[in-house]
Image (cartoon, rainbow, N blue to C red):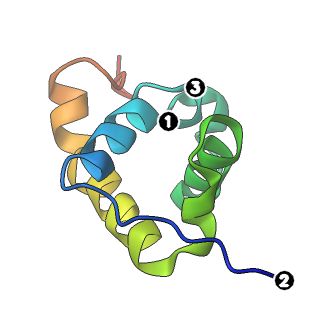
């Protein structure tokens, strides 16, 4: 099998994908009982780039961006508060 070459993510790509995830249904109440990693994986499978699922360092970088942006997403109204 020929390896697939993927260029490294740009510095803004993880942040952009993280915010798209946080604005998706996978970050909402419907999937609230799923662990964050499972929701993150489902988002990547549905909306891409799914190649990140097999790129450990890029996946970790993206997951860290998601986690670090949860607070700002709550404050900006992207994520609904669980206590509303």
Q: Name the residue under label 1.
A: 27
Of circles 2 and 3, the one toward us is: 2
Q: Is residue 70 above or below residue 83?
A: below
Q: In terms of secondary structure, where does tag 3 sit?
A: helix
Where is residue 9 shown, x and y percent of the image? 33, 59
Q: Is residue 75 left or right of residue 46?
A: left
Quadrant placement of the C terminus:
top left
Mark 1 neighbour density, 10 Å: few (under 14) some (14–19) many (20 or more): many
Q: How far apart are marks 2 and 1 (CA)?
A: 35 Å
Query: Observer-nearest residue: 55 or 65?
Result: 55
Q: In terms of secondary structure, where does tag 2 sit?
A: loop
Residue 32 lies in quadrant: top right
Mark 2 neighbour density, 10 Å: few (under 14) some (14–19) many (20 or more): few
Q: Distance between the residues labelled 3 and 1?
A: 5 Å
Q: In terms of secondary structure, where does tag 1 sit?
A: helix
Where is residue 39 shown, x and y percent of the image? 60, 48
Q: Name the residue under label 3.
A: 25
Q: Which mark is residue 1?
A: 2
Lower sequence index among marks 2 and 1? 2
At 46% from the left and 67% from the top, the residue drawn is 59
């Amino acid at each position: 099998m020929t390896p697939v070459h993927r260029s490294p993510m740009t510095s803004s790509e993880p942040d952009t994908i993280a915010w798209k995830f946080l604005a998706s249904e996978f970050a909402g109440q419907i999937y609230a009982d799923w662990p964050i990693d499972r929701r993150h994986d489902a988002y990547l499978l549905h909306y891409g780039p799914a190649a990140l699922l097999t790129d450990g360092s890029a996946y970790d970088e993206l997951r860290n961006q998601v986690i670090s942006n949860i607070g700002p997403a709550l404050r900006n109204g992207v994520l609904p508060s669980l206590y509303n």
